[in-house]
Amino acid sequence: MKLLSFNLGPILGKTALATAALGFFLAAGAPAAKANDWDDCNRRISHTEYHYREAVERYGPYSRQARHWDHERHEAYECREHLRHEYREHHRDWDDRY
């Protein structure tokens, strides 16, 4: 009479492979976390200021390139103003304590 025997090798191997694949996809699919939006806006302002000044020097203040970087610079300042507004709205009650 033959006894039933379980061979766990292939089952454990497939389970380990599936777990590793799932872990990889979860870790690789997650976007990188942004540490500080304020620093991002300030970095963007510096970048656009530089390119705007370079475009004005090279092509003149009314050129297509200067207008493009002026528009980008304006959007970067809007980003900072939005964050400043959000911060003030969030901390408005905290200022009344003192």
Image: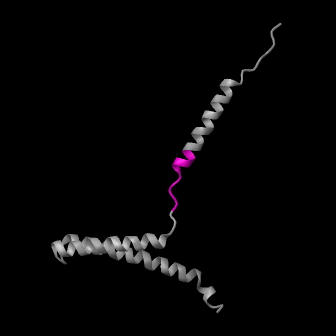
List x then y, in percent, for residue 10.
Answer: 66, 24
Q: Residue at x 56, y 43 (%)?
A: 24
Quadrant that contains the C terminus: bottom right
Q: How many marks?
A: 0
Residue occupying the point 16% across, 76% down: 60
Q: Is residue 53 left or right of residue 16?
A: left
Indicate left or right for 48 with 65 as reference: right
Quadrant containing the N terminus in the rendered view: top right
Rendered location of residue 22, percent (x, y): 59, 41
Q: Is residue 64 magenta?
A: no
Extreme residue in the left direction: 59
Measured along the vertical axis of the image, is residue 97 above or below residue 79?
Answer: below
- The region drawn magenta spans 25-33
Q: Position of residue 5 (x, y in %)?
A: 77, 17
Coordinates of residue 53 in the picture (x, y in percent): 25, 75
Above/below status of 65 relative to 95:
above
Q: Residue furthest right?
A: 1
Furthest toward the top, the residue is: 1
- 29 part of magenta stretch: yes
Q: How is the image coloured?
A: one colour
**Quarter where residue 6 is shown:** top right
Q: Residue at x 16, y 72 (%)?
A: 59
Using residue 40 as the reference point, say whether residue 6 is left or right of it.
Answer: right
